[in-house]
Amino acid sequence: MFKKIKLLSLFMFMCASSASANFVDIVAKIRPSVVGVGVHTPTTQPQNILRGTGFVIGNGQYIVTNAHVLPTILDDQLLQKIAVFIGSGKNAKVREAEIIITSTLYDLAILKISGSALPALTLASQALYPDGSGIAFTGFPIGGVLGLYPVTHRGIIASITPSVVPVASAEKINLTMLKRMKNPYLVYQLDATAYPGNSGSAMYDMTTGKVVGIINKVFVQSTKEAVISNPSGITYAIPIRYLYQVLQENNIDIKT
C-alpha cells in the first residue's frame, strides 16, 4: 500500500513538473511577440514614454492594444510619434507606428509598424472560454517606473460578466457608462492582478499559448465598478471575439 502511494505521488509530481516545463516554453514563445506601446519624442528627454502593452498578430506588422493606451494628441512641433518598443531593457528598439483603427466601444486599437516582421501570436477561436480556465498574460506592469521588462502573471477566468452593470441612481451614470448601456457586451473577470501598464496585454491559454482576450485594467473597470467607493482592483479582459469583430468590420486581413 505504501509503495502504491509513493508511486502515485511520484506520478503526480512528474505531471506537475511536466506542466510547469510546458508553461515555461509557452512564456518563452510569447515574450518576443509582446511589445510596449507609447510615445517617441526625439527632441526631448526622455525620448520614450511607455504607456501600455501590445502584442503582435497577423503578418507580424499588426499590433493590438487598448485604445486608451494611445495618446489623445501628439505635438507635431516636437516631432512626437506613436511608438512600439521591441525587446526589453536597454536593448529595446523603437519603431514608429500608425493607427489603423480604434474601437471606442471595445477599447481596442490596431497599429501597424513598418520594417521587418515580428513573431506573431495565434488567436484562439471566437468561442468564450468557460469559468475556471487557466490563463496568463505577459506585459509591462507600471512600465513607466519599472521599465521595459516583460512580466508574466497567471490565474483563471473567474467569471464572464456584462461590461456595465445597473447603478443605484442616475447620478452615478457617466457618459461612458451611458454609451456602453446602449450596446453592452461580455467581459472576462479574472482572479489574477494586473496593473495599469498591463493594459493591452494578450491574455492567453496557459496550455496552448493562443490569445483568448486582451487585458483591460482601466476602461472596463471604470464602468463595472462605478458604484464602488473603493475600487476592488479586479482585473478584466476583452474576449478575443470582439477583436475579430473589429477586424471584420474594417476589412482588415491579418492572415500571414
Image (spheres, helix red, strand yellow):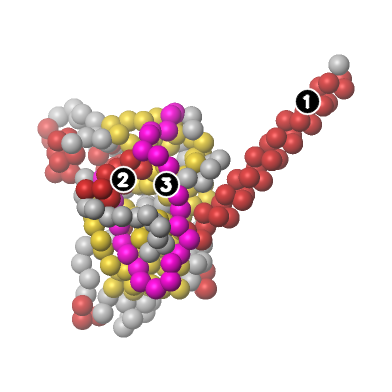
Q: Which mark is residue 123?
A: 3
The amino acid sitting under disc 1 is Leu
Image point (26%, 48%), residue name: 248
**Magenta residues, dominant SS class:** loop
Residue 23: x and y in percent read: 60, 45
Closer to the chain start, of discs 3 and 2, is 3
Image point (65%, 40%), residue name: 19
Most extreme residue toward the left, as rendered?
170
Q: Which residue is mark 1?
A: 8
The amino acid sitting under disc 2 is Tyr
Q: CA distance from mark 3 to mark 2?
A: 9 Å
Q: Is residue 4 one of those drawn in magenta?
A: no
Residue 197: x and y in percent read: 40, 56
Q: Which residue is mark 2?
A: 244
The quarter in which the C terminus is drawn is bottom left
Q: CA distance from mark 1 to mark 3?
A: 37 Å
The amino acid sitting under disc 3 is Leu
Closer to the chain start, of discs 1 and 3, is 1
Verify CB contact (< 8 Å) between mark 3 and mark 2: yes
Residue range in magenta is 106-131
